[in-house]
Amino acid sequence: MQLNFSGLRALVTGAGKGIGRDTVKALHASGARVVAVSRTNADLVSLSKECPGIEPVCVDLGDWGATEKALGDVGPVDLLVNNAAVALMRPFLEVTKEDFDRSFSVNLRAVFQVSQIVARGMINRGVPGSIVNVSSMVAHVPFPSLAAYSSTKGAMTTLTKSMALELGPYKIGVNSVNPTVVLTAMGQKVSADPEFSRKLKERHPLKKFAEVEDVVNSILFLLSDRSASTSGSGILVDAGYLAS
Ligand code: NDP
């Protein structure tokens, strides 16, 4: 599926590594102008070399004031990918207040904040838009030692529907992608135990985890007008796991 985002400006959070980085590359290759938001400047420097012309923004999205300063005047955005997240692994009984606050500020509160900034701009300009929230299959099924992370993704399901409800009248579609394990830095961490990882993979009907490219393809589809009548919904990129 060849998608063309020429003439559109996209903003991708968590652009430095993993799924966010490849999403920036794919959007750039499809003609979009891209604002790439991430926390580690070195990642943005190397990404800018790979994708000339992108607009890097270095900020910790867990910091409300810094995010407002960095993105408050970001300008026109047509496509938003809320991808940045942290997966802090800890058994439920040992989760600290700091774990909880960090998980919710990066994974959920920043989605509220950045989406508000972007959606207000779309509404003021009177243009349609598309927002994709990168969630997880753990929004639907728990994983051990990921209670805080999973809770943020469960809440994201409701947030996605709420945003779709309230932004739909302005022709702004809002959806999520919900992947199984993808072997990025985050995915390697959550599946580090070889026995756990083997059994987990075996439970997937397709006997595999997802590839970064599979997730990026679903993000691009949801951003594009090929999904023009889809909103408040989610695409499982789970190799069949939830059917097992
Ligand atoms: P990675 O950890 O590989 O990359 C995450 C990116 O987000 C990094 O560039 C990171 O920057 C950035 N980021 C994290 N916190 C912040 C912050 N506070 N402010 C700005 N940028 C930040 O993760 P993935 O690519 O694997 O994950 C991307 C998305 O996919 C996440 O929403 C995740 O929950 C979801 N997902 C991932 C799965 C997996 O198995 N990998 C499975 C299901 C869903 P830095 O490294 O500098 O902190």
Image (tube, rainbow, N blue to C red):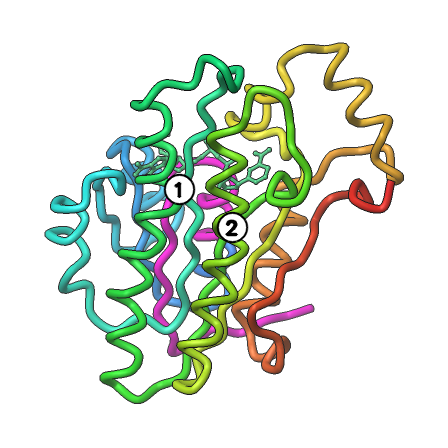
Question: Dot 1 surroundings within 10 Å: few (below 14), some, or many (20 or more)?
Answer: many
| Badge 2 residue CB within 8 Å of ligand 1 | yes
Can residue 44 be seen from the camera position used here? yes
Residue 174 included in the magenta stretch of the image? no
The amino acid beneath tag 2 is Val
Q: CA distance from mark 1 to mark 2?
A: 10 Å
- Where does the magenta region start and end? 1-25
Residue 6 included in the magenta stretch of the image? yes
Can you give x and y, in whole percent of width and height, for residue 209 in the image? 74, 34
Check the image and report above or below for 113 versus 105. Answer: below
Helix or strand or loop: what does disc 1 sit on? helix
Q: Using the image, tell me which numbered label, if any, was put on residue 134.
A: 2
- Give the side of residue 189 with respect to residue 208, left or right: left
Quadrant housing residue 41: top left
The amino acid beneath tag 1 is Asn
Closer to the camera, 208 or 233?
A: 233
Can you give x and y, in whole percent of width and height, for residue 192 in the image? 62, 14
Can you give x and y, in whole percent of width and height, for residue 228 in the image? 59, 81
